[in-house]
Image (spheres, helix red, strand yellow):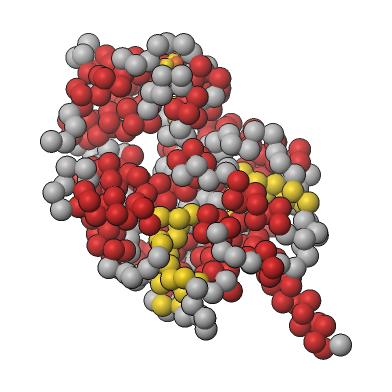
């Protein structure tokens, strides 16, 4: 039986109202309003469960003011899963009030339908110049008109060719040590194709054959966290079928949010499904973040050349607090010869992206982001490395706003640069 909204009362009553969540919530830090911290949200949700409160517009807006960053969850002495509570109440809102026409269009027509999504993105990449203009220094792009997005928001352009069309479905290597399937996620497929290329190139150099299933789709996280569970379940089942069909040792992801979705959220979403409950668990056991996979490969450090640059690292919330990946990216970065790694102050603080949060609440997301940009700037690093495309875009936007000339890239790209540095050195020596 699917969990009823009322059954969440068991979670709600675990809150002992200690206030520990106040110290870690990025939204509370900016707004200083009890309704925006975990304790306040829990109280409001309890009011709805007990039928003391209605799902008013004010309540709905308060529930949208959560980054789902899990900072409160890991710091809560009672282990209250506040992000799950917020998600449950958003689902209840959709069930009682329905989705807005825009969300219905995006979730049910575009994201659910691979052909429509692909076609839309291809058209978007051709005509994006009409509605966006180049950002400062030719970096990114800014909306020419409102479009429901703040006109100051620096976005990365859609790639001319989606990543999945740049590579064959099976990327062979001469001596296969391992065979993996790559779940690209939407941002790598349509925007940050450079990250996808780095993932494939690095794995191939380490003897890993990479399969990129053409029929994979969006992981469904934006749909699920906005409460549209029926569509999210359909998307989960489709991805499970696609990936379980592949004969691979692991499924690699290069985004903490997609990874957490495939590793844990699918199993929770489909726990009552007689056919897919077990399949979702099976897929979950196969999921590996790119950095987890790389550090498990023997001799991955041997191919690195010197990179005399100063680098810092930002922990994406879902990669760190969801997939518990913390040391692996640092191990990769610190292994690169000539590189200086400087840890920033509080690298685990949310950058303020929160997926669609930064589109709906741009002003607030920039205040949160400003703290991240300041801590990046304090390190004196030339490059900020991270493991999530949404963080990459949001931090690049913040750096641009504050005029801080730091390049942002994925860990895979940094590692590819190190491998290329060794290949260049070897090439030059051969010429001598
Ligand atoms: S830290 Fe946990 S128990 Fe304490 S007030 Fe926040 S949600 Fe409640
Ligand atoms: S998930 Fe993050 S933004 Fe939401 S209440 Fe918890 S700490 Fe605050």
**Front position in the image: 416 or 375:** 416
Above or below for 24 versus 301:
above
Q: Tell me the quadrant of the picture where the N terminus can be found.
A: top left
What residue appears at the point 41 percent right and 77 percent down from the top-left corner?
Answer: 170
Examine the rendering and report whether any part of residue 37 can be seen. Answer: no
Above or below: residue 381 compared with residue 247? above
The answer to whether residue 51 is seen in the rendering is: yes
Which sits in the foreground, 343 or 295? 295
Residue 242 is drawn in which quadrant?
bottom left
Quarter of the image with the C terminus is bottom right
Q: How many marks?
A: 0
Which one is nearer the viewer's eye here, 279 or 106? 279
Provide residue 58's location: percent of width, then percent of height: 33, 21
Instruction: Give coordinates of residue 366: x percent, y percent.
Output: 57, 36
Quarter of the rendering containing residue 82: top left
Q: Left of 203 or right of it: where is 311?
A: right
In the image, is residue 149 above or below residue 191? Answer: above
In the image, 16: left or right of 111?
right
Q: Where is residue 152 shown, x and y percent of the image?
A: 56, 44
Q: Which residue shows up at 64% across the image and 33% down it?
A: 346
The quadrant where residue 36 appears: top left
Query: Residue at position x 20%, y 52% from top?
Result: 276
- Quadrant position of ligand 1: top left
Q: Residue furthest bottom?
A: 431
In-front residue for pair 31/218: 218
Looking at the image, which residue is at 59% across and 36% down?
A: 348
For residue 277, side relative to residue 139 (left or right): left
x%, y% of residue 359?
45, 41
């Amino acid at each position: 039986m699917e969990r009823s909204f009322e059954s969440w009362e068991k979670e709600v009553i675990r809150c002992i109202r200690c206030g520990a969540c106040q110290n870690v919530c990025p939204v509370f830090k900016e707004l200083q309003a009890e309704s925006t911290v975990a304790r306040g949200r829990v109280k409001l949700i309890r009011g709805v469960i007990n039928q003391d409160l209605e799902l008013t517009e004010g309540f709905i807006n308060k529930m949208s003011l959560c980054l789902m960053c899990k900072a409160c969850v890991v710091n809560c002495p009672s282990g209250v899963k506040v992000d799950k509570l917020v998600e449950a109440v958003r689902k209840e809102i959709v069930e009682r009030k329905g989705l807005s026409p825009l969300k219905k269009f995006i979730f049910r027509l575009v994201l659910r339908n691979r052909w429509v999504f692909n076609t839309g993105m291809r058209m978007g990449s051709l005509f994006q110049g009409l509605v966006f203009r180049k950002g400062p220094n030719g970096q990114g792009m800014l909306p020419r008109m409102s479009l429901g997005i703040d006109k100051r928001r620096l976005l990365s352009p859609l790639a001319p060719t989606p990543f999945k069309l740049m590579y064959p479905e099976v990327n062979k290597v001469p001596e296969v040590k391992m065979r993996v399937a790559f779940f690209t996620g939407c941002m790598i497929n349509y925007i940050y194709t450079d990250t996808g290329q780095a993932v494939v190139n690095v794995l191939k150099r380490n003897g890993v054959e990479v399969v990129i299933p053409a029929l994979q789709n969006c992981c469904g996280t934006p749909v699920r966290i906005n409460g549209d569970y029926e569509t999210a379940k359909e998307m989960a089942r489709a991805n499970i079928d696609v990936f379980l069909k592949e004969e691979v040792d692991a499924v690699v992801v290069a985004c903490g949010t997609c990874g957490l979705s495939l590793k844990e959220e699918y199993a929770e979403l489909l726990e009552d499904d007689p056919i897919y409950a077990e399949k979702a668990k099976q897929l979950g056991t196969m999921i590996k973040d790119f950095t987890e996979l790389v550090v498990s490969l023997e001799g991955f450090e041997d191919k690195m050349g010197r990179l005399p640059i100063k680098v810092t690292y930002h922990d994406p919330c879902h990669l760190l607090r969801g997939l518990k990946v913390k040391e692996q990216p640092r191990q990769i970065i610190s292994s690169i010869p000539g590189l200086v790694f400087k840890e920033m102050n509080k690298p685990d603080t949310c950058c303020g992206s929160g997926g669609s949060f930064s589109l709906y609440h741009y002003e607030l997301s920039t205040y949160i982001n400003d703290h991240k940009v300041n801590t990046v700037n304090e390190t004196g690093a030339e490059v900020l490395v991270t493991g999530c495309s949404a963080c990459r875009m949001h931090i690049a936007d913040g750096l641009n706003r504050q005029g801080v000339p730091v390049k942002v890239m994925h860990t895979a790209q940094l590692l590819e640069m190190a491998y290329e540095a060794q290949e260049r050195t070897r090439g030059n020596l051969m010429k001598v």
